[in-house]
Image: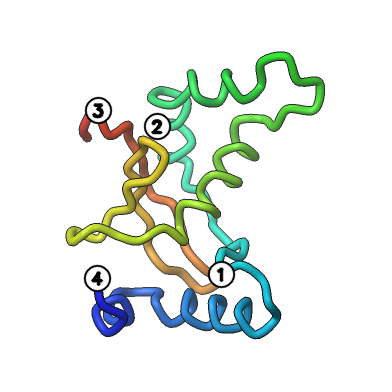
């Protein structure tokens, strides 16, 4: 995807500003982007990604809860490149984000191997 195509998608301006600010400060371009999580996305994560979350929590006293884990993963996924259909394919999961006032909202997700 060219830089011109990347700026045509919704929310691209916010990501571009964050990447530019990060580059100016010498940070990696991946900054934490505010992501709101819909109830539907939490339900889908509990149904389709529970094994990934449980693997994260195994043997850890300070493991994140499902919501916190999902928010952390979503804030990383929102910075990943989008496919031609506007979806994010990252870490074996398909993520559906929509821009909102503060950043992005995760609407739903599914495992790449399962489909919607």
Q: Position of residue 93 (x, y in %)?
A: 36, 38
Callout 2: 10 Å neighbours few (<14), some, many (20+)? some
Which label number is shown at residue 29?
A: 1
Label 1 to label 4, Cα distance in Å?
Answer: 17 Å
Residue under pointer 4 = 1
Q: Does label 2 or label 3 sit earlier along the sequence?
A: 2
Q: Residue furthest right?
A: 61
Work out which quarter of the rendered image holds the N terminus and state it. bottom left
Q: Position of residue 26 (x, y in %)?
A: 68, 77
Mark 1 and mark 4 residues within 8 Å of each other at the beta carbon: no
Q: Residue at x 40, y 74 (%)?
A: 11
Which label number is shown at residue 44?
A: 2
Q: Position of residue 59 (x, y in %)?
A: 73, 14
Q: Does label 1 or label 2 sit earlier along the sequence?
A: 1
User: Quick one: SS at disc 2?
Assistant: helix
Label 2 to label 3, Cα distance in Å?
Answer: 14 Å
Label 3 to label 4, Cα distance in Å?
Answer: 24 Å
Q: Is residue 97 above or below residue 60?
A: below
Examine the image and state in which quarter residue 49 appears: top left
Q: Residue at x 56, y 69 (%)?
A: 29
Specify whether 82 is left or right of 58. left
């Amino acid at each position: 995807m060219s830089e011109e195509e990347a700026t045509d998608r919704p929310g691209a301006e916010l990501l571009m500003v964050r990447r530019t600010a990060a580059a100016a400060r010498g940070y990696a371009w991946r900054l934490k982007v505010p992501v709101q999580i819909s109830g539907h996305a939490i339900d889908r994560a509990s149904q389709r990604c529970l094994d990934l979350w449980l693997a994260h929590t195994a043997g850890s006293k300070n493991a994140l809860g499902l919501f916190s884990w999902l928010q952390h993963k979503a804030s990383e996924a929102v910075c990943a490149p989008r496919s031609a259909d506007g979806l994010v394919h990252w870490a074996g999961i398909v993520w559906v984000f929509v821009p909102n006032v503060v950043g992005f909202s995760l609407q739903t997700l599914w495992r790449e191997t399962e489909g919607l």
